[in-house]
Image: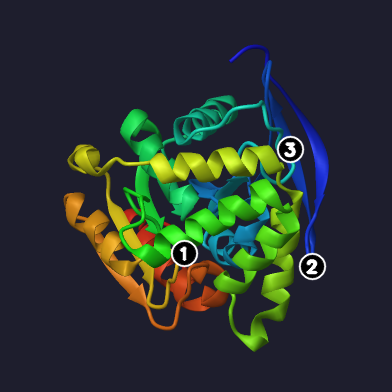
Amino acid sequence: MGQRRREGTAVRMSVPTLAASRFSTSNLTLSYLDLNPTGTAPVLLLHGLGANGSSWLPQFDALLQAGHRVIAPDLRGFGQSSYPGHNSIADMARDVAELLRELAVGPVHVAGLSMGGTVSLQLALEQPDMVRSLTLVNTSARFRPTRLDGWVYYLLRYSLLYLMSQRAQARLVARRTFPHAHQDELRQVFTDQILQANRHGYMAALRAIGCFNVLPRLAEIRMPTLVVTGERDGTIPPSLQQLLAEGIAGARQVTIADGGHAVTADQPEAFNRILLDFLTVLEPALTV
């Protein structure tokens, strides 16, 4: 991918400030958090559409206290990462693979939420030697809507981006993701993250998700896999997530009560417990 370099910078988050690094190639600069770099059993966290690596903040302490190294990139076009003018799920998976090679780390435990889950699947299929395990959160092997309301939501999001503004689309998505009155702060943080994204990169990623389909290839995935489903996920129907679990040999599906699409943020304690239980089985030397 051309000449590479890394340099330090700073990411301002809603509460703390975390030191971020940048990995550069000839046409892309990828921003990422690398927490506890001397830790063991590295965990790669891949965010959902519109978010960035800091969206995994509710998981950081739990993973760090268990001794994990935590790597959370901003995927191309999101957060502080650049947008090189094109995007696909395969592009994002290749970016992540290049980052892992640059850091000389792997295999890693990979956790991906929604869009991040598609990148996780693509990485596992194309670079299986890099992936120790998969945790697939509110995601699917095929994102093509199966119901009318799904098509309406998808087309509305794209229309708002194309015809109106990124802010209008951000408000729609944040309200749908965090619909409850007590979730005002979560809505605002998510809205701010979406507005930080490159508008064209966001649109390209939305198109890429709509075309994503690895259902016929799920049998190729051999690493331990956990599928985590929010009971009230209004974006990815739990039935599609069940197909994902059924298609991967040995995969286990866990449903979190009252969890929405961003279950990592709206039910963090339950999610962290499930994730750490899964990782502890695979890494019994670590402390939970």
Q: Residue at x 38, y 37 (%)?
A: 122
Vertical order, 15 against 96 (above or below): below
Report the residue marked by disc 2.
15
Cα separation, mark 2 vs mark 1, equals: 27 Å
Q: Can residue 35 be spotted in the picture?
A: no
Question: Callout 1: 10 Å neighbours few (<14), some, many (20+)?
Answer: few
Q: Residue at x 45, y 77 (%)?
A: 259
Q: Residue at x 35, y 54 (%)?
A: 140
Report the residue marked by disc 1.
287
Front disc: 3 or 1? 3
SS at badge 3 = strand
SS at badge 2 = loop
Marker disc for residue 21 = 3
**Residue 56 in the figure: left or right of residue 217:** right
Cα separation, mark 3 vs mark 1, equals: 27 Å
Question: Callout 3: 10 Å neighbours few (<14), some, many (20+)?
Answer: some
Residue 128 figure quarter: top left
> Residue 192, percent across and down?
76, 60
Residue reaching furthest to the top: 2
**Render colour scheme:** rainbow
Question: Callout 2: 10 Å neighbours few (<14), some, many (20+)?
Answer: few
